[in-house]
Amino acid sequence: MEVNQFEAGQSVFFELVLLLSIVIDNSLQNTDSSTILDNMIPRPAYIEQLRRAERLPLLPVLTGIRRCGKSSILALYADDLLARDTDPSRILRINMESLEFDALRDYRAMGRFVGEKLPHGGYLLLDEAQEVDSWERLAASLLAEGAVRCVLTGSNASLLSSDLGRLLTGRVFEIPVETLSFAELASIRNDASLDRLLSRYIRVGGFPVLHALEYDNDSAAAYSSTLVDAVLMRDVVQRHSIRDPDALKRILAFAFDNVGSITSARRITEYWKSQRRSVSVDTTVNYLTYLCDSFLLRQVRRLDLRGRQHLEYGEKYYAGDVGLRRGLLGVRSSDIAGVVDNLVYLELVRRGWRVSVGVVGEREIDFVAQKGESLCYYQVCAAIDTQSTIDRAFGALEAVDDQWPKAVISLSPSPIAGRNGIPVILLQDFLLGVE
């Protein structure tokens, strides 16, 4: 009887958590959709990728964390289609976070609705496809028939890895969507001081609505905090039926607090022991995986540069946007080194590089970026102000015996231009692509 009462209490708590998450997420959605669409930030690189996808027999899927701008990109793409003389009646936009489409959460109902609205073919722009049960069946059917061209968005990295996702294996053109880059922000705030703009970007992060509506620092932090809760509840707790949301949030906070440092599941388990709580290594591994799937976290593996093999231990984690970290942990001046690391990592990902942490004997290189057969090596510093910092920054790069580009990235101006042919690049210039 006591066990049943406990389970019943857990069930009630879980339902309340989900209800709260829906209220939070709908509030954010209403804020974003009713305001940012009137202040949309152009993102031509994504529109160009969608145009390129039109020439391929593939299904374009925009993936990324909630509120990173996927809905706005769909709206911009619809405008682009209209500018190319597409009949408005042949463009169907559906946002599954709107109650207007709540009856379409089954793929068969969605299929009937699409058939009624686009009887002669056209474009289906489906936002948050994962909210439609068995959406993969619908997408595979429409792709096979060819009359209706789908463009989908989703807020979970495992969107295409389910059993049903195999229906689309080899037929998906995935377009990862990141929050705003500093270069994108600078392009729309070209009258602002770049120094002040970078300072704001470091504090606020890159969520488009924060810059489209020019949130102040405190309002931006409140928005980011609410967004963390919404993503946790909707994309992790609800999706995976997590019964201990507090443990999940504490693991996220631990990972955010240790950005750029080795953060293994075993290390987190030891932290739990110090807090007199028991959370198994397996549970911690699962929670970290779920947090990465939701794009709140990004895992970066360590690469042995001599053996060219990824190590099976000692991974690092970075925030999906530096604003999320501030929203959860608040502002701490001692965190600047981790924030700068995080910004460089996200910028490399935006540019299409596959990123690892390099290991050379006892030394470590912050980022090894790979694209095809090309490599680049980067060390990152908040400031190069002591001889020990200089030696750490350059020493590991100098230990790599190849001719691929190497550089040290620094937030603050450096007293030296470089060493042994390895230049120092200001963070601002790196983020703007001026190297």
Image (spheres, rainbow, N blue to C red):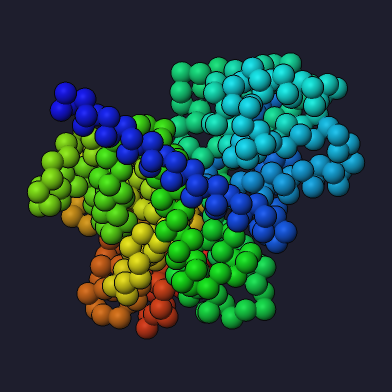
Look at the picture and state if 217 lies above or below 347: below
- Residue 260 appears anywhere in the view: no
Q: Is residue 336 left or right of residue 53?
A: left
Q: Position of residue 47 (x, y in %)?
A: 70, 46
Q: How many numbered discs?
A: 0
Look at the picture and state if 257 lies above or below 138: below
> Residue at the spot x=49%, y=57% of the render?
347
> Residue at the spot x=64%, y=17% of the render?
108
Q: Position of residue 310 (x, y in %)?
A: 29, 39
Q: Is residue 234 left or right of residue 14?
A: right
- Looking at this view, name the residue that lies furthest to the bottom: 415
**Viewer-proximal residue among 113 and 165:** 113
Q: Position of residue 309 (x, y in %)?
A: 29, 38
**Viewer-proximal residue among 195 and 270:** 270
- Residue 228 appears anywhere in the view: yes
Look at the picture and state if 135 lies above or below 430: above
> Residue at the spot x=49%, y=61% of the render?
223
Quadrant where the N terminus is found in the figure: top left
- Residue 335 lies in quadrant: bottom left
> Residue at the spot x=50%, y=68% of the render?
219
Q: Position of residue 93 (x, y in %)?
A: 72, 37
